[in-house]
Image (spheres, grey):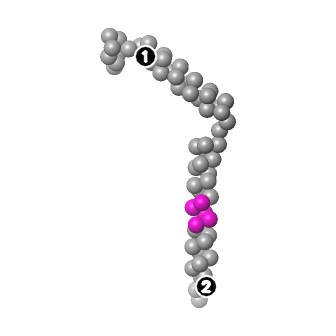
Amino acid sequence: MVDVVNLRRFKKRAEREAAAKLADVNRARFGRTKSQRASDEHRVGRANELLDQHVIGGEDAS
């Protein structure tokens, strides 16, 4: 025979799992220190500057 399932408990468990997944995504996105964000911004800025140095005549070389 099939076991009886309490739908309320099933819905609550599904909501908890969805909330946990969202929390993981938010931790990855927003869980960084100010110095880490500044370091990443500096790295991206420097990479853009290096790419801009390879522009020929105002157009992309590729």
Q: What kind of residue is marked 1?
A: Asp
Image point (65%, 38%), residue name: 32
Task: Name the spot of residue 15 as percent of width and height, x first.
Answer: 58, 66
Task: Name the spot of residue 44 as percent of width and height, x first.
Answer: 53, 25
15 on left or right of 53: right
Query: Circles 2 and 1: CB distance less than 8 Å?
Result: no
Task: Name the spot of residue 53 as percent of width and height, x first.
Answer: 44, 12
CA separation, marks 2 and 1? 65 Å
Q: Which residue is mark 1?
A: 52
Q: Is residue 23 magenta?
A: no
Outermost residue, bottom side: 1
The answer to whether residue 58 is above or below residue 37 is above
The answer to whether residue 44 is above or below residue 2 is above
Magenta residues span 15-19
Q: Secondary structure at mark 1?
A: helix
Q: Which residue is mark 2?
A: 3
